[in-house]
Amino acid sequence: MNNEILFNEIQLILFLPYLRHIMNSDNKTILEKANAAVSAGDNEGYLAYCTEDTYWNFMGDEILDGKDAVRAYMKRTYIEPPKFTVETMIAEGDFVTVLGRISLKNNEGALIDYAYCDVWRFRDGKMAELKAYVITV
């Protein structure tokens, strides 16, 4: 094997963990920016971080297919901007998993607290799919 080719392969092998770290950090940052937007009441700013065909599955409850479905969900559910507390955020490849709490006002004005585990799949730097496990606490 040519020494130059071998050297290039070694460089690539050494660079891959760094590249994975950068990708993981980018996806976490994207999710943090999106959550900051929705927490500030900027639903459209949040949606800018989603793919057009974003797919949300609230496991055992509701499925939202596409950005328009998510927009309608946000309009009816986020009477006031949600309050998030992120406890843990783990990124690996195209996925970010988040454990946390969210508080939402219901139609009667009462604040309801939930615990959640969100598993996000990213595509081309945007949130493409959500599997959300949510319980009232």
Image (cartoon, helix red, strand yellow):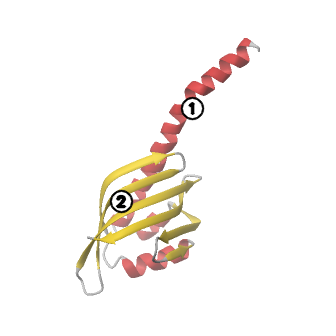
Location of residue 53 by image quarter: bottom right
| As drawn, 10 above or below 36 | above
Residue 136 in the figure: left or right of residue 12: left
Say which amino acid is labelled 1.
Answer: Leu
State the residue in front, 103 or 49. 103
- Residue 21: x and y, percent? 48, 37
Task: State if disc 1 and disc 2 touch (CB < 8 Å).
Answer: no
Report the residue at 38% width, 66% height from top: 38
What residue is shown with label 1? 16
Report the residue at 33% width, 70% height from top: 135
Report the residue at 48% width, 49% height from top: 27
Q: CA distance from mark 2 to mark 1?
A: 30 Å
What residue is shown with label 2? 36
- Residue 88: x and y, percent? 34, 51
State the residue in front, 16 or 109. 16
- Residue 45: x and y, percent? 44, 64
SS type, badge 2 = helix
Mark 2 or mark 1, which has the lower sequence index? 1
Residue 137 badge: none
